[in-house]
Image: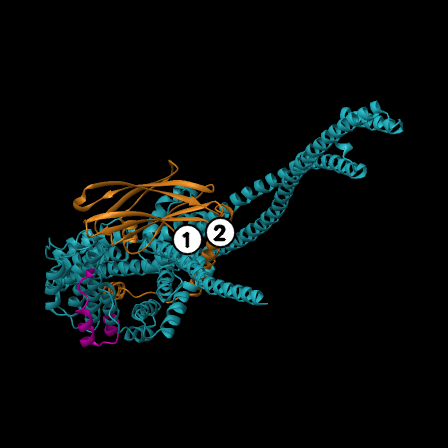
Amino acid sequence: MKVKFAIALLVLWSNIGQSENLSPINKEIQTLREQVISLNRDLQILEQKLVYPSETKVAVYVSMTIGDYFELDAIELKIDGVTQTSFLYTDKQNQALRQGGIQRLFVGNIKRGMHDVTAVIRGKGVDNSEYIRAISGRFGKMKNALTLELKILDSSAVDQPVFNLVEF
Amino acid sequence: MIKQAKRAIKNGLTYAFFFVAMTPIVHANAQESLQSQRALYELDYRVALFHHFQGDDLKALREMSRLESLPSKQFIDNLARLNKGKMSLSFGLIDNADNILTALDRNLPSSIDSSSSWLENAKYHYKSGNWLAAQQALDQVTEPLDNVATEQASFFNAQLALKKDQMSRFNNHRNNVIEDKDLAAYLRHNHLLTKAQAGQITQFDLLELITQSFTAQDATPQSAEQQAIAQRSMLVLGYAFIEQGKNELAINAFQRIDIDSHVLEPALLGYELALNNLAQYSLAKNVFSRLASRDNLSIYVQEAILGEAYSSEQLGDEKTSVAKLRQGIKRLSAHKSQLRSLLIKFAVDSSCFSALIDQNSSFWCHEDNQDLLGMAFIEMLSQQQFSFLSEQILDVASLTNNLQQRSTQLDVYNELLNNKQKLSVSRIQYMKQNNLKKQVADLIARRDDIAKRITFAKGVGNGSFFLPPKEAALLTGVKKAAMRFRRLDRSNKQTKKYRTRLRRIEGLVLWHVLYKRDENISQTDYMNMQLNEQTQVLQDHLQQLIDDTSHMGEVRSQLADIAALKQKTLQQIDVSRELISRLKHKLHALIEQHFTQRQSQLSQAITNAKFSIVRLQDASYQRNQAKISRITGDK
């Protein structure tokens, strides 16, 4: 019976939260991870040059400051009346935005000249009420890439979320 | 002189004014450009954070790595470095994280961020098992942190204090871990483990655990993690009480473990042990029987088979005991034989072994082996080392998958560029053959025509070249008439009269000629302007041709980049496949070792069971002999 007791103790007597020492194969996996990051980066740079050259590139970012008055459900982005992308937000993505992360919502190509950009924002406002708001702007595409940021801010003055579409 | 001096002063002042006025403009432009670069950097950096906060650290690190390759890397501050360290830790780049965090700590010992970086550093050292370095890093956490980080720092401090057996320090830090219930549960469990190993578990520990985790608390429901830890803690208490001989308390502890708990089997075994110790063999036998009837023949079930026979023996039911032992031997032998055949199967059929590792690809293993595979899989799950290796294999497989996706993406870009190249070539050919040559020929003809007219105009000098034939003939006629009149008698009145009229006509003709000449010159100018425009078009086309040609060079360089990337990607895919293969070999060896050990354990259990049978039979025989002797003696 003592043997059984020893077996059970062997299984039990392990400290939770303690991890294994790094083995040589772990080092190799780390190197592989580094290489994967480096390849992903190089490919992204190549993609930017190839698919979205700055002469035609347009990028739209989404940021949220505080976010107490608003929970984002979805955004539909239109350029010159044509829907470019629609995005549904998860709780995790909402949380990431509240923590200070910025989402690269859309990257695409447009011609030089003036363009109408519209974002239709859906979500839940204070008291969990449905909230739909469209925000538009007219922006000029020049030689450089056009970069826009859709800012979702809390306005304590009106106890409502405020939306801004600004150019960099 | 005075005027010149005034002008010079005026010009000098103008230049000075221009210089003074333009300098801030140039400076302001540079500043504006820097601000714009910074704003763009902030966007990309926070995109990296967006991925990091969602747990997608590969994308987060890719963004950070891209930022580091751009001129905007000048804006990367210590907070960004700290976050990169955190991303690296989460992505398993422990060495990179250590380099980043150590450098950060060395450079900025008094910065407001240094405490967070020291905490990350401590986490890294703790994770890699370097307790001393972890404690040294934690000692540097002097600045106030947010609540979550403060509790984390207290958790690691408490864990380290426990390892050093500094109980007062442990309690101080443990008292700071309030909000994070999971961390608090870990600390309580590890504290109980330490006490159990030192033989210091008391009834109070049991009561405390019951109050904290086993009493209905509707207001603050426990997370699955907390419940699992509490079950494990209760198991620790149960075995600690058995060791102390407090079997009633042990039973109290084991009885609180849930029927669907992951520690049910060791709990049942402990419960039976406590019952046996209390000589409650009948109850123990029932519980042994319950555990022994479980399908999965784990090490606990194996012990229960023997325990059930032992309880029967203690109850004086030797017959049942022998029967149970024989049943047990049969079951243990069958399991041993299954393990042996599985090992043979793995040795001859690697696809069968892969099916076990990949868990879902049993399709590749023969149908007859499915039950065996299921059994092997359960065996595998019971060992942490297997799950650790399996996780590593899945991890590397996901990296391979990412590389394969990138490889496919590269193929798409390669095709895209090839199409672009073909388009450029065809455009150049079209322009060369149809458009450009025609335009050049046309322009040459026009140029020659205009040049010829201009040369003729210059040669004649009177502009007659510009006259249409009718006007030119009229002018010649008038000139001939005038010559004839000159030869006539000048005193003749009639002649004088005609000469005057002829002079008027000659004047009129000359006026007409001059008018036509101006008109023609203006026409020539217009043609010249057209020629210039055409030349401009030609130059534009030529520029486009140059652009296309240089673009071709760019496309060729991009194609070369893609080829290099593709080669690098394929190399890494090979590396990752080789890693997976090595990990599988390692796992294979471990499984073989484990199954061999299990066979030895089973053999030992079978031998014990056989020995018990022999012992029971011997005892029975001796009792019978004694009975016979007694009867014959009596007689």
What hue represents chain B? cyan
Is residue B526 on the magenta stretch? Answer: no
Whether residues under marks 1 and 2 lie with C-beta atoms below 8 angstroms apart, the answer is no
Asked whether B634 or B369 is in front, the reply is: B369
Q: Please state the extent of the stretch shown in magenta in the rendering.
A: B158-181
**Closer to us: B447 or B76:** B447
B56 or A4: nearer the viewer: B56
Q: Are marks 1 and 2 on the same chain?
A: no
* Residue type at tag 2: Leu
When the figure is inspected, residue B240 is found, relative to residue B443, above or below; the finding is below
Horizontal and vertical percent for residue A8?
24, 63
In the picture, the disc for residue A43 is 2
Residue A45 in percent (x, y) is at 48, 53
Say whether residue B177 is magenta.
yes
Please tell me which residue lies in front, B128 or B579: B128
- Check the rendered structure and report the hue given to chain A: orange
Residue B60, image quadrant: bottom left
At mark 2, the secondary structure is helix
- The chain identifier of the residue carrying mark 2 reads A
**Helix, strand or loop under label 1:** helix
Quadrant of residue B391 within the rendered picture = bottom left
Residue B303 is situated, as x and y percent measured from the top left of the image, at: 24, 58
Q: Please state the chain letter of the residue tagged with numbered disc 1 in the rendered image.
A: B
> What's under tag 1, amino acid-wise?
Leu
Res B344 visible? no
Which residue has dot 1 on it? Answer: B343
